[in-house]
Amino acid sequence: MQIRPFAPEDAHAVIELWTAAGLVRPWNDPRKDIERKLTVQPDLFLVGESEGAVVAAAMVGYDGHRGWVNYLAVSPGSRGLDYGRRMMQEAERLLIELGCPKLNLQIRGDNTEVRAFYEHLGYTQDAAVSYGKRLIADSPDGSY
């Protein structure tokens, strides 16, 4: 797998990957999320490619205080090949290069497989509660 920055022609494959990985939710339009990411640190939007196919992706960001990883996904057929670990290593490398002291990420509470993946990589659960507030509705009816 080669890791490279996202290119606009990757959009369809990345959305299919996120969908296959169970990351897409009605309240987060992945097309709009891609558009937004391309306006902020687009070089930190990573794609893993193998034999011409997108097999992994991650949105990485740094706000000057903390780094974040969102939408990390590996195609179901490529799991167990160390691609997720390699994507996280690249995210960490890029964030360290920017001077980022700590990386945060969010995992849905019931996603035990992903929690185990991150714990294997040395991540621990912080003593913090995540809050959110929708500022812009992504769904057509505005309900999310």
Image (spheres, rainbow, N blue to C red):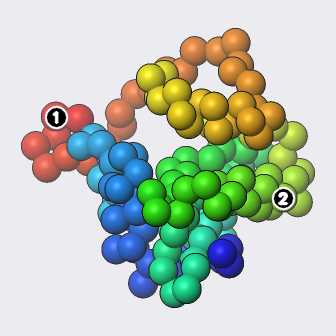
Residue 82 image position (x, y, % from top left): 69, 58
Residue 3 image position (x, y, % from top left): 67, 73
Quadrant for the C terminus in the image: top left
Image-based side of 19 in relation to 121, left or right = left
Quadrant position of residue 143? top left
Image-based side of 103 in relation to 28, left or right = right
Quadrant for the N terminus in the image: bottom right
Quadrant position of residue 40? bottom right
Q: Which mark is residue 73?
A: none
Instruction: Say above or below: 26 vs 112.
Output: below
Residue 28 image position (x, y, % from top left): 32, 46
SS class, disc 1? loop
Q: Residues within 10 Å of mark 1 (few under 14, many from 20)?
A: few
Sequence-earlier tag: 2 or 1: 2
Look at 63% across and 31% down and name the residue there.
116
The residue that disc 1 covers is 143
Look at 47% across and 29% down and name the residue there.
111
Look at 71% across and 53% down and name the residue there.
85
Look at 78% across and 56% down and name the residue there.
89
**How far is disc 2 from disc 1 in space, using C-alphas?**
38 Å
Image-based side of 43 in relation to 49, left or right = right
The residue that disc 2 covers is 93
Instruction: Say above or below: 42 vs 132.
Output: below
